[in-house]
Amino acid sequence: MTDFEIIARDEVDKLGEGPLWRAADQSLWWVDIVTPALNRLAVATGAVERWAMPEPIGWVVERADGGLLAGFRSGIAALDPDTRAIDFWVAPEPDRPHNRLNDAKVDATGRLWFGSKDDRDLADSGALYAMGADRRPRRQDDGYQVANGPAFSRDGQLLYHTDSGRRIVYRFAVGDEGTIGESRPFLTFDPAWGYPDGMTVDAQDCLWIAHWGGGAISRFDPDGRRMLTLPLPAHNVTSCAFGGAALDRLYVTTAAMASPGTPADGALFVLDVGVGGCPATAFAG
């Protein structure tokens, strides 16, 4: 049985996603995309705060200039974590009105990488974008059913990115100017595993992937071999991030929606997996 703890709180997440560890205040932040809400866990006290958001919110990342950057349905905005004030920056996809932003990470240079998806799940209109401090999103790849889970190798030279609908995790070489090389399949989920969702890389350069519809989280080595799978009592496991003072705790988000009624659907889990993670980089702007 997986060694895990369920973080107690009054409300579960309809679609929990995007966990982010903030070392500055030793807290974990994550979103509930469809409620929509922004959550914060203060690790020292165990207290969880939850704030309503004005529209679906796919992710938050830290900013080097302070505060958070958030991916909303309508676009990217700066978000003040103290006042919850929102300063809209840019709409990456004005030509795709049915899309929303979905999952993001910042690379070692401070560049933001994020994906999108058709919110109706009717078209393969999702894409992968990169955005630097100039606040100009640049489309890097296209034609996704559900763009998900960007993550980077420890040396920053490889980008992992998923099309959850096709059950494929891709790997790209990343250039110095924020461009990517040819898309190459890194691994394909067996249908019995569910669908690959959010991801993170640990300190040993292995990739952890959440199983949407598979009730588990798995670790893969740099060659794409599955090293272990940890089951959880939630059907739709959505994403993961390392946190804690030593980055030795794996926080895992889940979703209550589209589930057959597994006991802990929509809960936030924390696991001791015997390996640490890598610190998150703040967006350079």
Image (cartoon, grey):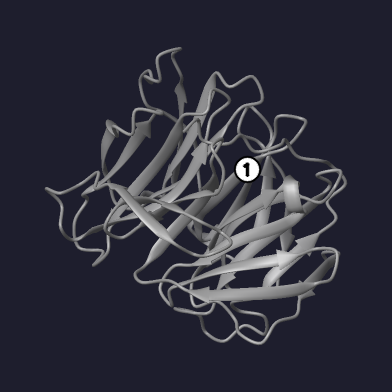
Residue 24 at x, y = what percent?
Answer: 74, 46
Q: Amino acid at mark 1?
A: Thr
Residue 80 at x, y = what percent?
Answer: 51, 56
Task: Look at mark 1 in the image and give the residue it sits on.
Answer: 200
- Closer to us: 30 or 208: 30
Q: Is residue 202 left or right of residue 87?
A: right
Q: Is residue 211 left or right of residue 113?
A: right
Residue 256 at x, y = what percent?
Answer: 53, 79
Q: Quadrant of the N terminus?
A: bottom right
Specify the farthest residue to the left. 95
Identity of the residue drawn at 85% across and 47% down: 245
Residue 92: quarter of image: top left
- Closer to us: 263 or 154: 154
Question: Pointer 1: residues within 10 angstroms few (<14), some, or many (20+)?
Answer: many
Identity of the residue drawn at 65% across and 36% down: 225
- Closer to us: 2 or 129: 129
Specify the farthest residue to the top. 176
Marker count (numbered): 1
- Closer to us: 71 or 259: 71
Please say whether residue 27 is visible from this viewpoint. yes
Identity of the residue drawn at 23% across and 67% down: 120
Identity of the residue drawn at 38% across and 18% down: 181
